[in-house]
Amino acid sequence: MARIKVIVVDDSAVVRQVVTALLSEDPDIEVYAAVADPILAIARMNVQWPDVIVLDVEMPRMDGITFLKKIMAERPTPVVICSTLAESGAKTSIEALSAGAAAIITKPKIGLKQFLVDASDDLVAVVKAAAKANVKRLLPKLAVVSKNTADVIMPAADKHSAMLQTTERVVALGTSTGGTQALEVVLTSLPRVTPGIVIVQHMPEKFTAEFAKRLNSLCQIEVREAQNNDRVVPGRALLAPGGKHMLLRRTGAQYYVEVTDGPLVNRHRPSVDVLFRSVAKCAGANALGVIMTGMGDDGAAGLLEMRNAGAHTVAQDEESCVVFGMPKEAIKRGGVEKTVTLSAISREIMQQLRL
């Protein structure tokens, strides 16, 4: 197989040198150019187009976000953002993901060289996953997803009978690469009357609050970054904070979340497996588990636990995924009851109110 051709675009000579050296150690990757800004990158890319672009944000002559949007408009190509981002930069990161970036790697301001060396395995994995990404699925959607009212989707009689038969339903969503746009498609399709939703999206610390705010501004339901002891109620979606695990808990007939520290699970915090396991224990058959686009296998074991506990389980199909890793692994392990396209996930969520 041909090696993955990568161009590194960063105004830091140290970053260009270290990233090039680390990626070049992998026999499947060839860094054919490392340049200081997008203008230089365009000149090199006109000669040879890359399979993956590793891109900084703050650079002279043209910033990374502008360059990203230009690439996605003219010749969509997997882009990995590798940038030093403080809390104030979270909006820029969300903008990058919304514009079509496949993934983001956060660089610290101090100890940068050592960080890149320590994170070399992650960097290589992200670049390889990006090379396989379905770039068309990363592009911003021009059409607005229609929003149905509760009366159209869920007749009142069905709602009341369901509530008499069982406790409130809980929907657990887990996603990673490509998930920012996928979650927007799903959540903006939901009416105000919706089962309580808990979400793990693999994102760095400080990104999730801004992402939740953005979704909240687009959705009929309430979307917010979860805080410890937040209630899980209909019409509300709680997003696990970056850098924290989120677990579902129950007292009586009421569900709430516990936001806690802890070791990385499947190299992630928050971890989809942690959330899914807690949902299996606390909600059982009253839950729906949905595993969506993302690389790796986080969530596969937890989704199987949910299914074994009586929950309904759904996976996003390969065609609509940016990266089919997480759903594919969940299917392989037997945790998936049903596979659906991205546009059908909101319908699966609303079906929970009819059970």
Image (cartoon, rainbow, N blue to C red):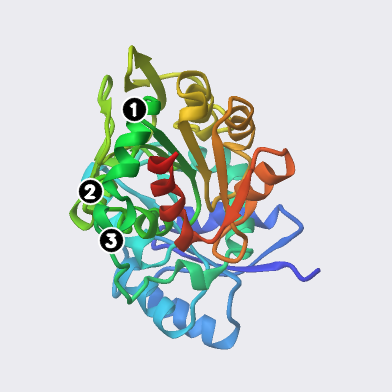
Q: Amino acid at mark 1?
A: Leu
Which comes before the other along the chain, label 1 or label 3? 3
Disc 1/disc 2 C-alpha distance (Å): 20 Å
Q: Amino acid at mark 3?
A: Asn
Residue drawn at x 51%, y 30% as measured from the top left: 276
- The residue at which mark 1 appears reads as 164
Front-lying residue, 90 or 257 = 257
Considering the numbered disc 1 on the image, is that residue within a helix, a strand or a loop?
helix
The answer to whether residue 106 is seen in the rendering is yes
- Mark 3, other Cα within 10 Å: few <14 / some 14–19 / many ≥20: some
In this view, the residue farthest toward the right is 1
Q: Position of residue 344 (x, y in %)?
A: 47, 59
Residue drawn at x 56%, y 41% as measured from the top left: 313
Is 350 above or below relative to 283? below
Residue drawn at x 72%, y 38% as measured from the top left: 333
Is 21 above or below relative to 107? below
Which comes before the other along the chain, label 1 or label 2? 1
Considering the numbered disc 3 on the image, is that residue within a helix, a strand or a loop?
loop
User: Which quadrant of the view contains residue 146?
Assistant: bottom left
27 displayed left or right of 101? right
Q: Position of residue 27 (x, y in %)?
A: 76, 57
- The residue at which mark 2 appears reads as 192
Disc 3/disc 2 C-alpha distance (Å): 9 Å
- The residue at which mark 3 appears reads as 148
